[in-house]
Structure formats: structure tokens, C-alpha cells
Image: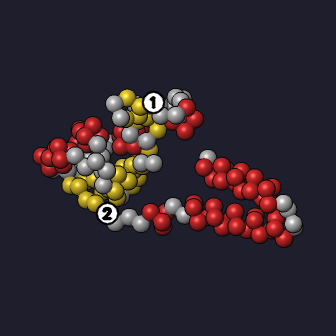
Amino acid sequence: MVGATIVRDKRIIAGGYNGSIAGGDHCDEEGCYVVEGHCIRTIHAEMNAILQCAKFGASTDNAEMYVTHFPCIACCKSIIQAGIKTVYYAKDYKNHSYAMELFERADVIIKKVPFDEHVLNNTAQIEQTVIQTVQEVLQKEAVPEETIAHLEDKLRQQFLK
């Protein structure tokens, strides 16, 4: 999952994530529509955030963008055209040298920031704790192992949603 937030004058003005167009099919439901190695069903997080600003009339001139992954070339060009002057990103992802060059020519400051995914994403830990607790309770109640295994599978499916 990729996310982007645009900040201007220390205020969040928009956010976006990699997702389908409004009302469109979602990859989670229909599967990705991959052409030439890329899912063409989705709009990148950076573009979604910029388009939110356009839709609601929020200026992006001299704004900052915080994004989970280094922007692709297309998003890089959109960021520059939107007048965003600083991009903070947490993870390297296909960092293209041409994107770096474009950012440099446009005087857009690029900063990689430290990011500890475990701080924000503790779903796996919560999932394991819930499953262990349920298993312990069911074992104390002498529920058959196959029933416990079936319920464990159901719980895991719920966490995937």
C-alpha cells in the first residue's frame, strides 16, 4: 500500500493512496489489471492527493508531500507541475535516476526519512494475539482440534480483509 499526504503552511490539505477511480473496480475485489508489468486500474497515491487539491481548489504551490515510497517518473512530473517544493519519502522503490534529475532541475528537495514499519503496522501481532487467545479458550472448553483449526482459518481470512 502506498500513501501520500500534501501539507501546506503546516496544515494537511489532501491525502491519497494507490487505488481505483471513484466507483471503479478495486484490485482487492477484481484482481489487478496488469499491462506491461503495471496495474493500470489504479491511480498512484501522489496523483490522488494532487487531484484532491485540484477538485477542491486547494493550492499546492510551495507545498510539501509526504509519501511512503519514492515517486515514479509520472508522479515526479506531476509533483513538479503542481509546484510542490519538498518531497519526504520513507522507502526506496525503483528510484529512477531521471526522476532524481527532474526533481533536481526543478529545485524540488527530496528527503528520505527513517521509517519503522512495525510502529505503524502491528496487525500481524494483533492477529497472532487474538488467534492464540481464541485457541486457548477453545482448548480449555475441549473443542475438537479440527474445529479450532477451522475457526483459526476464518479469523485469518478476516484479518486479510
Q: Which of 120 and 134 is in front in this view?
A: 134
What's the amino acid at mark 2? Val
Q: Do the residues labelled 2 and 1 touch (CB within 8 Å)?
A: no
- Residue found farthest to the left: 105
Relative horizontal placement of residue 74, taking residue 33 as reference (left or right): left
Callout 1: SS: loop
**Residue 88 sits in quarter:** bottom left
Q: Residue at x 29, y 43 (%)?
A: 72
Q: Nearer the viewer, residue 92 or 110?
A: 92
Mark 2 crowdedness (10 Å alpha carbons): few <14, some 14-19, many ≥20:
few
Q: Name the residue under label 2.
A: 113
Q: Mark 1 points at which residue?
A: 33
Q: Which of 51 and 38 is in front in this view?
A: 38
Which color mode does the image show?
secondary structure
Relative horizontal placement of residue 131, taking residue 105 as reference (left or right): right
From this view, report whether residue 91 is shown above or below residue 59: below
Q: Is residue 57 visible?
A: no
Q: Which of 120 and 87 is in front in this view?
A: 120
Residue 124 appears at what percent x and percent y? Answer: 57, 61
What's the amino acid at mark 1? Tyr
From this view, report whether residue 153 is shown above or below residue 58: below
Q: Which residue is drawn at 55% across and 32% down?
A: 30
Q: Which residue is drawn at 84% across and 71% down?
A: 140
Q: Which residue is drawn at 52% across and 28% down?
A: 24
Q: Give me the C-alpha separation between circle 2 and circle 1.
A: 32 Å
Mark 1 crowdedness (10 Å alpha carbons): few <14, some 14-19, many ≥20:
some
Q: Is residue 24 visible?
A: yes
